[in-house]
Amino acid sequence: MIVALKRGASPEKESQLIDWLKGMGLGVHISRGEFQTVLGLIGDTGRVDMDLVASLDIVDTVSRVTETFKCCNRKFHPDDTVVQVGDVKIGGGNFALIAGPCSVESEDQIVYIAKAVKAAGATLLRGGAFKPRTSPYDFQGLKATGLEYLKIARQETGLPIVSEIMSRADLELFEDVDVLQVGARNMQNFDLLRELGHLNKPILLKRGLANTLKELLMSAEYIMASGNENVILCERGIRTFSDYFRNTLDLSAVPMLHELSHLPVIVDPSHATGIARMVPPMALAATAAGCDGLIIEVHNDPQNALCDGAQSLKPEDYADLVKKVMAVREAVK
C-alpha cells in the first residue's frame, strides 16, 4: 500500500502516522521527493482501513500496490535512486563506466589495466577474484589473493573496486570491496541475497541467464527487504535461441526496468555478446536506450587471458569506445 502525503504536512503529524502504522506491525518505507513524501507500507496491509487513512488531513492519496515487489517499486519511490560509491554516483542522471578484466591474474596485470581504463574515463574498476566457471577444470580465480591485488590497484588509481561474491562464507574477505557483484548464476541464491541485505554496501545484481524482469526485481527485493537499499540492476544478456552470440542482450529491459523500479540499471555488453567486436555497438545501443552505466571487460592481452579473452577489449579500443559513448549520451539528452 502507498500513502502519499500532502505537500507541507507537519513533521509531528507525519511522525504520529508512521508510528501508528508501525504499531500495526507494518514496515514503512519513507521516500521524500522534491514535491511529495510517499510512505510505502510493507506487510499485511489488509488490516489497514484505507478510508480512515485517506481521511487524515495530511494524506493526499492512498492506493494498493498489486506487484509482489515493493521496496524496489517506483510507486514506492517515485524519484530515481542514486547509489553512491565513494565519489562516484550511479543513477539519477549519473553515468557509471565500470571496466577491467574478467579475472584478476596478477598484481602487474590489474594495476596496468586499472591505470589504462582510468585514463580512458572509467569511474570504477571491475575484476573477478572468485570465478564461477561452467567447467570445474577452468581457471577459478585467485580468490583472496585476487582481492588483495584489486585493493593495490585501487590504491594506485583511486578507482573504487567491483568484484563478484559467490558465497556467504566469503563475506569477511569482501569487507573492503566497494561494490559486491552478484553474478547471473547466483541471482536467486536467496540466502546470499539476505546476507547482502544486512550490509551497508552497494550491490550490483546481475540478471540470471533465463530469468524474467520480475524475477530480477524480486531478487533485488530480497536485498532491500533486509535493509540494504543500495542496489544496482544489471542486464547482461539472457539465454535464447541465438546461435551467433553467447547470449541475447535484452535492451528493452532498460526502459522497462526504469518504468517499474527506481533502481539504477546498467548494461554488460561483454557477457551478453561474448565477442569483442560486438561490444562497442551494443554498448552504444545500451547508452541510447537510457542505461545508467556500462560494465565492460578490458584486458591488456586478450588472446592470452585466463578467462573470457574473446569478449575483452584492449585498453586503446576501450578508450575509443568511451568517447563514442559520451557522444551518444550528449545526443540523447
Image (tube, rainbow, N blue to C red):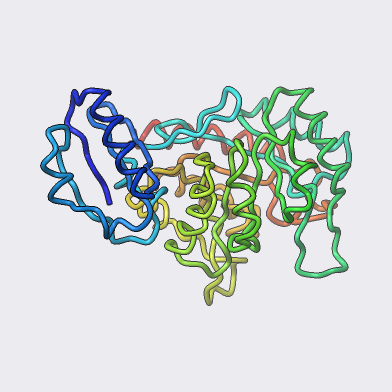
Q: Quadrant of residue 184?
A: bottom right
Q: Where does the image place residue 64, in percent across and percent down from the top left?
A: 24, 55
Q: Which residue is pictured at 38% across the width and 55% down the height?
A: 43
Q: At which x and y percent is residue 101?
A: 74, 44
Query: Who's the residue at 33% across and 60% down the image?
Result: 67
Q: Quadrant of the C terminus?
A: top left
In which quarter of the view is residue 97 placed?
top right
Position of 80 with respect to 142 (left or right) is left
Q: Using the image as rendered, state which of residue 110 and residue 322 is in the foreground.
A: 110
Point out the residue furthest to the bottom here.
241
Residue 176 picture location, percent across and down = 74, 33
Which residue occupies 19% across, 23% down?
Answer: 8
Residue 136, relative to residue 111: is it above or below?
below
- Determine the residue positioned at 41% across, 48% down: 71
Report the front residue among 11 and 95. 11
Q: Is residue 198 above or below residue 95?
A: below
User: Looking at this view, is 69 or 11 the one in front?
Assistant: 11
Q: Pinpoint residue 263: horizontal percent, then vertical percent.
A: 44, 44
Count of marks, rendered view: 0
Picture quadrant of residue 271: bottom right
Residue 77 versus residue 234 in the image, above or below: above
> Residue 13 vs residue 303: left or right?
left
Judge from the rendering whether residue 172 lies leftward or rightward of residue 202; answer left or right.
right
